[in-house]
Image: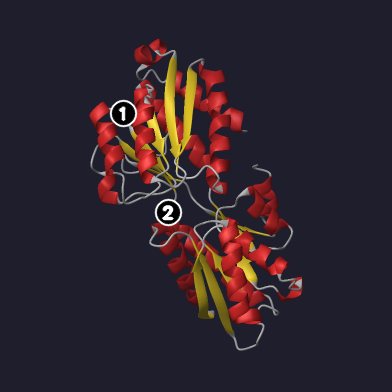
Amino acid sequence: MKKWIVFCAAAIFFLSGCDRETDETVKSIKIGVTLYDQYDTFISEMMASFTEYVSELEEETGIAINIEVMDASGSQSSQNDQVQNLIEKGCDVICVNLVDRTEPTTITDLGEKNNIPIVFFNRELVEEDLERWDQLYYVGADAFESGIMEGEIAADAFLNDANADKNGDGICQYVVLEGEAGHQDSIVRTEYSINTIMEQGVQAEKLGYAIANWNRAQAQTKMTSMLTQYGDAIELVLANNDDMALGAIDALKAENIDRDDWPIIVGIDGTDVGLEAVQNGEMVGTVYNDKEGQAYQMLLLAYALATNGDFDDVQLQDGKYVRMPYEKVTAETVEEFLEKE
């Protein structure tokens, strides 16, 4: 199916006649990519899809697509240097997974000065910053949508599982494992998930929350601390991503808590390991963040920019944004998402 999609896109691209003369002279392009953290599970899986699509598009178009990937390891200054390096290496377009979403100025200035388009992805910058130059783009998803879906999954589980309300008070006592402090996705995912739970008719009481920086090991440590503090009073764990949800599961296992006494656990992203946790019942559900769709759209956008091609197959909104929809994943639907892998 993936190959057929890429084939159709390539066929439309060449048969449309748009910029045909220019495209036929292009023999190779170079796309630079800099990641905020290559060990982030979602980013790692998205880049695996990106690389796969690159190979398929090369085969179908006959144009060599060279990829240079760098890891900023959580340092914005290092990422700025990497963008300069990628420009010096002759990249036609650079895809940036921002370390600090509030600090894109240096990268934007480098792109504009050297007339190299910049495609930001996954970690959305402030809207005003994206408007600073007409060759800046963003590929990702709407964080509020994932929060709403996470809240719906959690509310449905609490309302329909007689064992979910452990103390029988009719109130869902919950804890939150958040990503980075002050990060837009963390704030929005948390806010919308909790608001949605209450809108679904569930009374909710927050026991505590912890910043775990999207990280499984940190989440295990923070969850262990909350288990010590709140014990079996915790009826729901809302995690801003699957890795932190899995960290909560690791903590429950390490404390030898019987599976029947676990709280409801819900994540976001639909990573491979997250889907497996839903499949085996450790997580009630997750929200699928379409890494394949984002990778594919980012490649088509970068390819069009690098070859002066058309944007017919790029799902651009407002000329700047590509936003792929989220999807809810529960035990009833998880198999169809596992088949995408």
Q: Residue at x 26, y 27 (%)?
A: 114
- Residue 118 x %, y %: 34, 35
Q: Is residue 46 above or below residue 141?
A: above
Work out whether 76 lies above or below 66: below
Q: Looking at the image, is mark 2 or mark 1 earlier in the sequence?
A: 1
Q: CA distance from mark 2 to mark 1?
A: 26 Å
Q: Considering depth in this image, is 52 or 15 the residue closer to the camera?
A: 52
Q: Is residue 316 visible?
A: no
**Residue that lies at the very extreme toward the bottom in this rendered image:** 169
- CB atoms of marks 2 and 1 within 8 Å: no
Residue at (44%, 34%) from the top-left corner? 33
Of the residues shown, which amino acid type is indicated by label 2?
Asp
The location of residue 122, given as percent across then percent down, is 44, 46
For mark 2, what is the residue? 142
Residue 52 in view of the camera: yes
- Kindly identify the residue that appears in the image at 46 percent across and 66 percent down: 190
Disc 1 residue type? Ile
Return the x and y of residue 335 as percentages of the image width and height.
70, 51
Query: Which quadrant of the figure contains the N terminus?
Result: top right
Quarter-of-image position of residue 339: top right
Asked if residue 205 is positioned above or below residue 25 in the image, the reply reads below
Q: Which type of secondary structure does the marked residue at label 1 adopt?
A: loop
Helix, strand or loop at mark 2? loop
How many neighbours does mark 1 have within 10 angstroms: few (below 14), some (14-19), or many (20 or more)? many
Q: Residue at x 39, y 40 (%)?
A: 78
- Percent position of residue 95, x then y: 41, 35
Q: Which residue is mark 1?
A: 116
Residue placed most toward the observer, 15 or 283: 283
Q: Quadrant of the C terminus?
A: top right
Q: Which mark is residue 97?
A: none
